[in-house]
Amino acid sequence: MAPRKPPASSGSAGGARRMPPCTNNLTTALLMDTYQITMAYAYWKNGTHERPAAFDLLFRKNPFGGEFTVFAGLEECLRFVSNFGFTADDLAYLKTTNAARNMEPQFFQHLQDLDCGALRVYAQLEGSAVFPRVPLMRVEGPLMVVQLIETALLNLVNYASLVATNAARHRLVAGPDAVLLEFGLRRAQGPDGGVSASRYAYLGGFDATSNLEAGRQFGIPVRGTHAHSYVQAHVGMADITNRRLPYNPTSKTPGSDCADFVALVRESLELLNRETRDLLPEAQRWGVTNESELAAFTSYALAFPAGFLALVDTYDVLKSGVPNFLAVAVALRRCGYQALGVRLDSGDLSYLSLRARETMRAAATALGSARAGGFEDFGITASNDIHEEVLHSLKQHGHAITAFGIGTHLVTCLRQPALGCVYKLVEIDGTPRIKLSEDVEKVTIPGRKRAFRLYTKNGPAVVDVMLGEDEPPPEVGKRILCRHAFVASKRAYVQPARVEKLHHLVWDGAAGGVPAEVDVSLAAARERCGDSIRQMRSDHLRYSNPTPYKVSVSEQLFNFIHKLWLEEAPVGEIV
Amino acid sequence: MAPRKPPASSGSAGGARRMPPCTNNLTTALLMDTYQITMAYAYWKNGTHERPAAFDLLFRKNPFGGEFTVFAGLEECLRFVSNFGFTADDLAYLKTTNAARNMEPQFFQHLQDLDCGALRVYAQLEGSAVFPRVPLMRVEGPLMVVQLIETALLNLVNYASLVATNAARHRLVAGPDAVLLEFGLRRAQGPDGGVSASRYAYLGGFDATSNLEAGRQFGIPVRGTHAHSYVQAHVGMADITNRRLPYNPTSKTPGSDCADFVALVRESLELLNRETRDLLPEAQRWGVTNESELAAFTSYALAFPAGFLALVDTYDVLKSGVPNFLAVAVALRRCGYQALGVRLDSGDLSYLSLRARETMRAAATALGSARAGGFEDFGITASNDIHEEVLHSLKQHGHAITAFGIGTHLVTCLRQPALGCVYKLVEIDGTPRIKLSEDVEKVTIPGRKRAFRLYTKNGPAVVDVMLGEDEPPPEVGKRILCRHAFVASKRAYVQPARVEKLHHLVWDGAAGGVPAEVDVSLAAARERCGDSIRQMRSDHLRYSNPTPYKVSVSEQLFNFIHKLWLEEAPVGEIV
């Protein structure tokens, strides 16, 4: 493959800017379906390739049985648009394809000069709560270019929005205080499935990821401790080569270095066993803990005395893992360090976390605050096949978990692994076009539209409404009739206390690119996501049977749709 | 991000070679979970980082309710291993993470020099049918490096094998003659989800993809025609600017150019309508077809006279799309060209394809072979939400489809979007290690193992068997006792007529890389996939309730597993 183009210049006179190349090197101009090239050729051959066209990018159904979606992927789309263009290598490959066999050479010359300089893109802002049928983006420009970028835009929006929505749903169920960690890289659909999942899970409200590459690319906090293999890799204390632990130099209370941390751990384990015995129910007392596990925890603590978090389920959480963890925590404390907590990766997370907390509390009580201050605050991270429903069930049954590590279900969106965004022609050469279908849900809303979110006096959003480009926007305090696009009887007057414009010009090719005022940072999108969801009524966000949020059109647009529909639909004929 | 390392040198004295960089630029040394770095540090700090270790990469359950899996992703893993190493940029980022806060600077110096030169990787061959618990790969080498590459290998194998398996299952149901096209890019989980899906769908038996980038990267044939938007973008014949069509210069029968192809199409449509009327059942006769569709087909045929394939469901397949297609096909024929066929993208594919075929046959009959030779062979491509079950149902109910375009279900593996490959320590410092679990399926088979596939006289494979490294391999004609690894009563004597060694040395770091005899090409893997599946008994491949294929261990390995199990499992104590 040819080297990527150098990053585009990042500024212009008007403050509009072009963006750096896409995160993934596979996002080339050839990241398209073959039919985009064949259509482009047919338009070019017919001389209609520069006709002004407008396409809407939209979805028709919220994912995961929910009633909202989080829009994501816009920044990446703008990178794509900023850098779109065929390299010499792209064209050389194209010419070798079967599809290009009889194409005229001048066509490739035309492709060579193509870019998105004549495009305008309007979009909702990244991170916003969005709803079916209201376009996420509208792309305007010469027919050929607008058509050529279809698949890349769909690809970049579909999965991004799906993961962001999935993450936001997990956040809603887990509540604002739980720490949510994305752990999905190994099960993701490819390297960029993993990296994108980390990015958009963070956008949707996760706190951190295990994925270092995503951490680097997007500045997301990273988190991680150790695996079962670390425990398995130890056989016993003989595996520990250096037993010395310096006293914590940043500790407020003074102390001296520990010459034999292994002995201190053993001593602490015996002390704990003795002193917690009467405080614990019989079933939770322990006998001999697993030696290789104790060795692994000890060596890990020697490496990370200030960041000790132990995976406690390799052998037996309550009889081995938690006691071994506490023994190391006590020993660390005597050297001036505070352990962080434990991770559970199997079993009944509700039961185990509650019992683990009991054992931690018994230790705190037995040792007294002088020896065990902070022992009640240990983190308990859970990471076994967690998903939205598990979070919901844990909430109902009680648990003592402070952080959730979520992988497969989050990143592959196991409950629904694809969002069905589509890209539909709505206007050509100034003429609005409708796409009919026997399935009313698939009928497109013709023409270029403006969209607004209307809020009531009490705060929450009540309806999204689309109007024709030529209509005046809704006004605060002024009643507007909002109609269901297809069901004539569904309509309501709304007197908005606040009107939010949903579509913003995010790419203005002629002016140099992304307007200066458009903030496409991940941090902004993450904040917008939280804000946007908080402005929804809770019944739209509910886990079970949420209320559909209303999406409507103006009276004028309603009438226009139905006029066009009648004009286009063939009249049945009884022969 | 720093520039990638230059591609590794591709040869060595012994013929072993290093591979080019990974396909995706995100597949860096940092494509790992944070805990790999923290564990690496803890090993390094404890001085145990160079202990020889062996990890198995395996899965525990076949996907999609089936009884086989296709192994894929090996070539990409070898690219990763060939180029693994931390760049200065990687290390600079690592040092900024919270996890690295208290790490000693010498650790990063150690990381700086790390590569996979001390590793050996054994693997089954890419494209092979593989089964639960038999390692897909075994990675041997210094503990730290072997642990550091865990997540990347899992990531590169999991999705690849899932898609390849999915594709192979589609191929089994569709039969060897159907043309299978991968159309999933827009709904895939990110750009590389799309590109990887094309690659591994091809490996699993698909014929082509719509994805041009995948076509370029892997030499996969590409296919595509036009979208609904192409039809919508035309209003009527006035949209056609150049009506001239030169007579096909490669045609065997001579003829003259057509000055007004539009008129010829109109004339052909009238002719067809008149002459097929009595040959078609009343419900299939047509009146006035859609004009914008006819214009779109006409302009498309003018651009691709030798490659005309029309999407016929924008308005009405039988009353408009197929008649319009046939009219253009007749006109093309008069100019010496043969149309290719139609594509259906909605509705009842069984019914519509059968009726479309009837209409095509009626046209052929009415016009006679002189005017309509080849009209019975038009392709019918179907592409609406197709998956394995739809293919199965179409087969049962009858259809006239010759090619299937399959997207969302194939590329996102909607039925099961993740394969659960794991990476387990099986030996450290010469000591076999077992990982116990209350779930017997999760117990690992300890130590380094050799694996063989045994075939009966009649041909098909009957059992995969694992033996300890020190055991002699099974021999042809010699009875061997094959035991279920965990259920003592499940065992059988097998007298193999053929013995296939399953694990091959695919990376030998000390010898320079990938041994010369290892063929990692996509073409080889694709062929291997077909061969490997053909060698399975059909009941293992069956769509409904397939028979599980037997995976076993030798008597000696069985005894060893259970000895180790008893040694490691804590003995319960009644207090």
Image (cartoon, coloured by chain):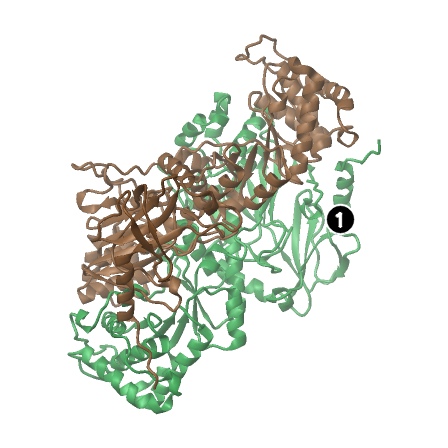
Chain colours: A brown, B green
Estimate how packed mark 1 is, as few (under 14), some (14 to 19) or many (20 or more) residues with alpha carbons within 10 Å.
many
Q: Quadrant of the N terminus of chain B?
A: top left
In the displayed structure, would residue B442 be above or below residue A207?
Answer: below
In the displayed structure, would residue B508 be above or below residue A420?
Answer: above
Q: Decide if residue A266 is on the left or right side of residue B278.
A: right
In which quadrant of the rendered view does residue A483 lie?
Answer: bottom left
Please name the residue shown 19% across and 52% down the image.
Answer: A113
Please name the residue shown 34% across and 72% down the image.
Answer: B312
In the displayed structure, would residue A573 be above or below residue B392?
Answer: below
Give the residue pinned by disc 1: B558
| Residue B222 at least partly seen | no
Q: Nearer the viewer, residue A263 or A205?
A: A205
Helix, strand or loop for disc 1: helix
Q: Decide if residue B373 is on the left or right side of residue A305.
A: left
Q: Nearer the viewer, residue B169 or A50?
A: A50
Q: Tag 1: residue type?
A: Phe
Q: Nearer the viewer, residue B259 or B465?
A: B259
| Residue B119 at least partly seen | yes
Where is residue B77 shown, x and y percent of the image? Answer: 49, 46
Where is residue B42 shown, x and y percent of the image? Answer: 57, 26
In which quadrant of the rendered view does residue A569 lie?
Answer: bottom left
Where is residue A87 shown, x and y percent of the image? Answer: 26, 50
Q: Quadrant of the C terminus of chain B?
A: top right
Report in which chain the residue with disc 1 lies: B
Q: Residue furthest right?
A: B575
Where is residue A570 shown, x and y percent of the image? Answer: 30, 75
